[in-house]
């Protein structure tokens, strides 16, 4: 394993943790029953939710770049 693999591994573990800490506003029954969902309603994220959302985006970009670099460096 090269250094990029370790970065990807750490970023994936942190990404899983960040996704698991996020709260969902919808329940699973409305997702499969076809009820009206307010998934994309206009609301501002603040505090910890904003931090987790931005962290998830940043970690996703880091994972993708690290995996692409890892494949090209071999």
Image (tube, grey):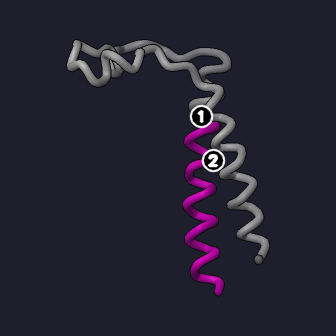
Q: Is residue 2 left or right of residue 63?
A: right
- Residue labelled with disc 1: 19
Q: Which image quadrant for residue 58?
A: top right
Callout 1 crowding tier (Cα within 10 Å): few <14, some 14–19, many ≥20: few
In the rendering, which numbered label is found on residue 59?
A: 2
Residue at the far bottom: name it: 74
Taking 38 as reference, is 72 left or right?
right
The majority secondary structure of the magenta stretch comes to helix
Residue 68 among magenta residues: yes
**Around disc 2, counting alpha carbons within 10 Å, would you say few (fewer than 14), some (14 to 19), or many (20 or more)?**
many
Q: Residue at x 41, y 15 (%)?
A: 27
Q: Establish if 61 lies above or below 46.
A: below
- In the image, what residue occupies the spot 33% across and 21% down? 40
Residue 60: horizontal and vertical position, in percent? 57, 49
Position of residue 32 relative to residue 68, above or below, is above
> Which residue corresponds to the image point at 59% horizontal and 67% vertical from the top-left?
67
Q: Would residue 19 appear left or right of 8 to someone viewing this image? A: left
Q: Element under label 1?
A: helix
Q: Position of residue 73 (x, y in %)?
A: 65, 83
Q: Is residue 33 above or below residue 17?
A: above
- The tag on residue 41 is none
**Closer to us: 20 or 28:** 28
The relative height of residue 53 versus residue 46 in the rendered view (above or below) is below
Quadrant of residue 22 within the rendered picture: top right
Q: Residue at x 64, y 86 (%)?
A: 74
Of 39 and 44, the residue lying toward us? 39
Q: Which x, y percent locates residue 16?
A: 64, 41
Of callouts 2 and 1, the N-terminal one: 1
x, y percentage for residue 4?
A: 72, 70
What is the span of residues highlighted in magenta in the rendered image?
55-74
Asked which secondary structure carries label 2, the reply is helix
């Amino acid at each position: 394993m090269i250094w990029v693999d370790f970065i990807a591994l750490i970023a994936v573990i942190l990404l899983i943790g960040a996704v698991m800490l996020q709260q969902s506003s919808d329940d699973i029954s409305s997702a499969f029953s076809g009820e009206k969902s307010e998934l994309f309603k206009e609301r501002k994220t603040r505090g910890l939710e904003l931090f987790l959302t931005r962290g998830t985006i940043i970690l996703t970009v880091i994972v993708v770049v690290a995996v692409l670099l890892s494949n090209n460096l071999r």
